[in-house]
Amino acid sequence: MTGQEFIASLSPVAHRIMSIYQFKEEKPIALHITDNTEKPCFMVNDDPNCYPLYINPDALGPMAEKAFIHQFCHCVQIEEQFPFVRSKTPDDPQTVQLAHAINSLVLDMFVNHVLNDNGYPKDVKKLEALYTELHFRFRYFTEKKLPITADNQVYAEYIYATQIARVYMELDSKRARALQKEVAVFSKETKLYAGIFINTIKAYPYDTHVGCHYIFDHLVDQLKLSDVLEIGHIKKPADEAAATEEVNAPDNVMPLNNSDSEE
């Protein structure tokens, strides 16, 4: 199968989504079939004339179309110059991981909105697995009287907070509140940060670059991360030849209201 054949095989729903964004006629997606099984669908923003997107339909099976549209939506965000947060010290893997977790949470809100509104199913099993993993991990930390940074993750409170927020936004708010109560036993900061993520994303429109800028600006300020993170805008290679932004499907996303977190 070629990239063109894959696009031709997409459903009318997928073609309708793609037709909404007419700018793609000027800078098209260059779809390549890959045998990569670790990253079966990804895009690298390194070409001024097109969006190189790679997909492994065999590995993705029936989820291939959803994965493609997911990456298509990230192309839209690049085209419209959505902001993102980045580490001020890109050689520090911990701050890079922190930035990725926050970007995944915020930028995927728009992507998931498009997917859900057009009838693509949620990956409920993956979300259930995330909830279960967090539940048992928090129980382990409590029983062993370990700090949340026991895995040598300096920013563990923030990263776990994004995961709790994902459960809230995409799976079940009640279970997310339960996770907040569990984590508060040994890390009140994580419970608080989860509430900040949720409140902030609910407060601003995540489907515009202006709204996302407000979200990131508020998060960096409220989470007191201005020393390690800064806000940037995805550059199109035509504007900045050195720009190379890889956009991967986010792993965890979601937010909690402070009012919810205090229950």
Image (cartoon, rainbow, N blue to C red):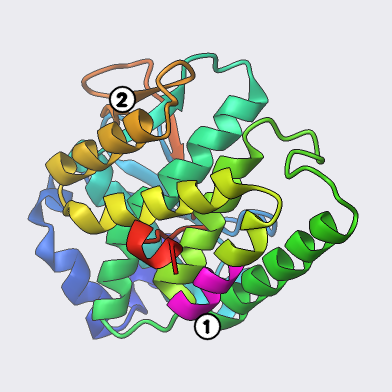
Q: Is residue 47 above or below residue 24?
A: above
Residue 37 falls inside the magenta stretch:
no
Of badges 2 and 1, nearer the viewer stands 2
Q: Which residue is mark 2?
A: 232
Left or right of residue 112, residue 247 in this image = right
Evaluate if marks 2 and 1 touch, with contact meaning CB atoms under 8 Å apart.
Answer: no
Q: Is residue 39 above or below residue 148?
A: below
Q: Is residue 24 above or below residue 227?
A: below
Instruction: Report the predominant secondary structure element of the magenta stretch.
Output: helix
Left or right of residue 143, residue 239 in this image = left
Crowding near the residue tagged with mark 1, few <14, some 14–19, many ≥20 C-alpha atoms within 10 Å:
few
For marks 2 and 1, give the CA distance.
35 Å
Residue 173 falls inside the magenta stretch:
yes
What residue do we see at 34% from left, 37% from top? Answer: 219
What residue do we see at 47% from left, 53% from top? Answer: 194
What residue do we see at 52% from left, 83% from top? Answer: 62
Callout 1 amino acid: Pro
What residue do we see at 9% from left, 56% from top? Answer: 22
Please state the horizontal and vertical placement of residue 146, each as a whole percent of the image. 84, 46
| Secondary structure state at the residue bearing disc 2 | strand
Q: Sequence order check: which comes first, mark 2 or mark 1?
A: 1
Q: Which residue is mark 1?
A: 62
Question: Residue placed farthest to the right in the image?
Answer: 144
Callout 2 amino acid: Gly
Q: Quadrant of the C terminus?
A: bottom left
Left or right of residue 87, residue 159 in this image = right
Q: Is any part of residue 220 visible from this angle?
A: yes
Q: Which residues are magenta?
A: 172-179
Please state the horizontal and vertical placement of residue 17, each as a whole percent of the image. 20, 70
| Secondary structure state at the residue bearing disc 1 | helix
Please state the horizontal and vertical placement of residue 116, each as a whole percent of the image. 31, 78
